[in-house]
């Protein structure tokens, strides 16, 4: 059985990881594939030699030939859990969302630990939304730039939010591991923590190596630059999901409100300010009193002619729980 050789790119990039995992796959597979006679000799036990092929029944020989013909090429299985995936053409395939979330899902956690981890990821998504809510003008501009496909503005605003996110989080520890890993470690056994680290190391190694597959003789600096770029990619996707899920619904409702009531510039600024304060104070978990306060401020910002239109629009929206 042929075993894929580790490329130089993977070897160099692996040096950026915190430790190297011994390749045990070949040893385990070789042990499992040992003939019974060889295994018995290893154990010091007498064993019977297998019957000659001529003594096998014709039906058994035909079944073996048919199985061999239909089974196709033998593919060496990966030993242990892994979130590294390749398609039929051998191209690297990323996991959806955070690598940490995919890796934790393979640890076989009990219900209590699994629920804790789900809460950690949910809190991270909420924190990303709160970051956007704390800078609502920039968030709305970010959404506009996406809608208009103004990539340069989107990139600038993504950097704006990334800088502020980094100030509010613990610095990266090593090779793409964030404070998220240490938060998850609270409910992991030592063995599970090591397994999580191993899966993440393997994933980053494979991803970086794939990105550098066309570069000859990549250096550690190449790997580091690539890793940072890929981390920015993950952050950009997290930010976009947080905007779509937690901020864009408010922006769309504000736009509907503006279209329906046609407020004056002064009235519009008062309404926008009320929504911004609502999002900041509620931390995206509004209670009934938050909604009542918001409704009151928007109502008082409008004159009598516009209030009727306001109620016609908001009555249906309130049932959805957004306001």
Image (cartoon, rainbow, N blue to C red):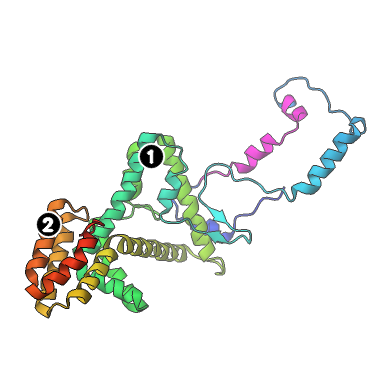
As measured in the structure, the alpha-carbon distance from the residue carrying label 1 to the one carrying label 2 is 36 Å
Please name the residue shown 70% across and 50% down the image: 2
Left or right, 56 with respect to 313, comes to: right
Tell me which residue sits at (75%, 47%) in the image: 71
Q: Is residue 48 left or right of residue 25?
A: right
Give the SS element for disc 2.
helix
Disc 2: which residue: 292
Residue 20 x, y percent position in the rendering: 50, 47
Q: Is residue 258 left or right of residue 128?
A: left
**Image quadrant in which you'd find residue 300:** bottom left
Q: Does 133 lie within the magenta span? A: no
Mark 2 surroundings: few (<14), some (14-19) or many (≥20) residues within 10 A: few
Name the magenta segment's main secondary structure.
helix
Residue 110, position as x, y percentages in the image: 41, 34
- Range of magenta residues: 21-40
Q: Image height check: is 259 above or below 70?
A: below
Residue 308, position as x, y percentages in the image: 13, 70
Front position in the image: 217 or 70 = 70
> Does the magenta segment cover residue 35?
yes
Task: Look at the picture and state if 265 lies above or below 251.
Answer: below
Whether residue 272 is visible to the viewer of this picture, yes or no, is no
Q: Secondary structure at mark 1?
A: helix
Q: Quadrant of the C terminus?
A: bottom left
User: Looking at this view, is 314 or 114 the one in front?
Assistant: 314
Q: Residue at x 49, y 61 (%)?
A: 208
Residue density around tag 1, few if under 14, some if 14–19, many if 20 or more, within 10 Å: some
- Find disc 1 in the rendering and name its residue: 114
User: Closer to the N terminus: mark 1 or mark 2?
Assistant: 1
């Amino acid at each position: 059985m042929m075993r894929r050789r580790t490329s130089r790119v993977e070897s160099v990039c692996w040096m950026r990881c915190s430790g190297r995992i011994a390749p045990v796959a070949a040893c385990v597979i070789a042990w499992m594939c040992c003939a019974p006679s060889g295994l018995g000799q290893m154990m010091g036990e007498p064993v019977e030699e297998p019957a000659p092929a001529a003594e096998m029944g014709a039906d058994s020989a035909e079944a073996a030939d048919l199985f061999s013909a239909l089974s196709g090429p033998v593919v060496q299985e990966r030993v242990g859990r892994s979130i590294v995936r390749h398609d039929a053409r051998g191209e690297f395939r990323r996991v959806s969302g955070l690598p940490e979330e995919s890796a934790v899902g393979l640890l076989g956690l009990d219900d209590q630990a699994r629920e804790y981890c789900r809460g950690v990821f949910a809190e991270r998504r909420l924190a990303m939304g709160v970051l956007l809510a704390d800078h609502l003008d920039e968030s709305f501009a970010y959404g506009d730039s996406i809608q208009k496909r103004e990539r340069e503005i989107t990139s600038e605003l993504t950097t704006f939010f990334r800088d502020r996110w980094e100030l509010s989080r613990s610095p990266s520890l090593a090779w793409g591991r964030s404070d998220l890993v240490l938060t998850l470690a609270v409910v992991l056994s030592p063995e599970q923590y090591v397994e999580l680290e191993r899966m993440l190391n393997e994933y980053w190694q494979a991803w970086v190596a794939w990105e550098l597959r066309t570069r000859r003789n990549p250096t550690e600096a190449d790997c580091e630059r690539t890793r940072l770029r890929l981390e920015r990619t993950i952050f950009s996707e997290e930010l976009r999901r947080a905007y779509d899920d937690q901020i864009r619904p408010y922006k769309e409702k504000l736009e509907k409100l503006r279209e329906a009531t046609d407020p004056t510039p002064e009235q519009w600024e008062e309404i926008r300010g009320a929504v911004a304060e609502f999002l900041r104070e509620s931390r995206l978990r509004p209670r009934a009193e938050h909604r009542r306060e918001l409704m009151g401020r928007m109502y008082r910002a409008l004159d009598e002619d516009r209030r009727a239109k306001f109620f016609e629009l908001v009555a249906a929206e309130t049932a959805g729980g957004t306001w």
